[in-house]
């Protein structure tokens, strides 16, 4: 279970005051026993409302890609689900707004230091990849994902499983044919 004290510090932080006013709490899961950390962009509207990360069509596809059941995915002793921001950022012109720039830098290190058994960090999308891979991320998510093996064994970059990315998946059939089977093997090994 995530530290209740740390959770409360996140809730009480001044940077989250506008979300407190709405009655929102941070949406993430973590345990001192987590084996895999999955870093996405930020909770979507449904995730914020249900307080359950990846609780939508994107999450269903992501679990298929990982080769895990809902029970495994939502077991914090197996998966820590830590988006770049723990609050729904709102709707933008082309989807949800981006996560706040300073949020992950403030809270991720504090959570990660409480998770000594992490074997793999899965980076879903550009924001997670740019933050965690620093200068090692390629110029595009496609290029970063295509060279996923250069980031192993610590990191595994993925494209976002959003229904909006179906065109990308059709243009890049190598992803589901070549990358996903390796991802599933790496996940299986990390969960042992």
Image (cartoon, grey):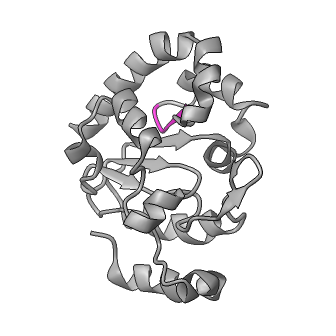
Residue 120 belongs to the span the image colors magenta: no
Inspect this view and state whether residue 158 appears.
Answer: no
Q: Quadrant of the N terminus?
A: bottom left
Q: Position of residue 11 (x, y in %)?
A: 49, 83
Q: Where is residue 105 in the image (x, y as percent from the top left)?
A: 63, 65
Q: In which quarter of the image is the C terminus?
A: top left
Residue at the image point whose x is 29% and y is 46% from the top: 73
Q: Give the range drawn in magenta.
A: 153-158
- How many numbered marks, from 0 up? 0
Q: Using the rendered view, name the quadrant where residue 182 is placed.
A: top left
Q: Nearer the viewer, residue 155 or 17?
A: 17
Residue at the image point whose x is 58% and y is 58% from the top: 84
Residue at the image point whose x is 67% and y is 41% from the top: 126
Q: Position of residue 165 (x, y in %)?
A: 61, 30
Q: Nearer the viewer, residue 50 or 191?
A: 50
**Prevailing secondary structure of the magenta residues:** strand
Q: Where is residue 138 in the image (x, y as percent from the top left)?
A: 74, 30
92 shown above or below 180: below
Q: Using the rendered view, name the quadrant where residue 151 is placed.
A: top right
Residue at the image point whose x is 30% and y is 37% from the top: 190
Q: Which of 114 and 95 is in front in this view?
A: 95
Apparent side of residue 85 relative to residue 68 in the rendered image (left or right): right
Residue 157 belongs to the span the image colors magenta: yes
Inspect this view and state whether residue 84 appears.
Answer: yes
Apparent side of residue 134 relative to residue 79 in the rendered image (left or right): right
């Amino acid at each position: 279970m995530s530290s209740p004290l740390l959770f409360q510090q996140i809730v009480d932080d001044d940077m989250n005051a506008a979300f407190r006013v709405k009655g929102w709490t941070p949406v993430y899961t973590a345990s001192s026993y987590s084996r895999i950390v999955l870093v996405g962009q930020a909770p979507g509207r449904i995730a914020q409302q249900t307080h359950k990360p990846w609780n939508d069509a994107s999450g269903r596809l992501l679990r298929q890609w990982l080769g895990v059941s809902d029970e495994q995915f939502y077991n914090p002793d197996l998966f820590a689900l830590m988006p770049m921001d723990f609050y729904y950022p709102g709707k933008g012109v082309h989807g949800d707004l981006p996560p706040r720039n300073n949020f992950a830098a403030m809270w991720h290190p504090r959570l990660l230091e409480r998770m000594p058994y992490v074997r793999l960090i899965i980076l879903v999308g550009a924001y997670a990849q740019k933050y965690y891979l620093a200068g090692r991320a390629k110029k595009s998510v496609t290029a970063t994902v295509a060279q996923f093996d250069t980031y192993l064994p610590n990191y595994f970059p993925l494209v976002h499983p959003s229904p909006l990315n179906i065109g990308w998946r059709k243009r890049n059939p190598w992803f589901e044919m070549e990358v996903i089977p390796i991802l599933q093997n790496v996940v299986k090994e990390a969960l042992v």
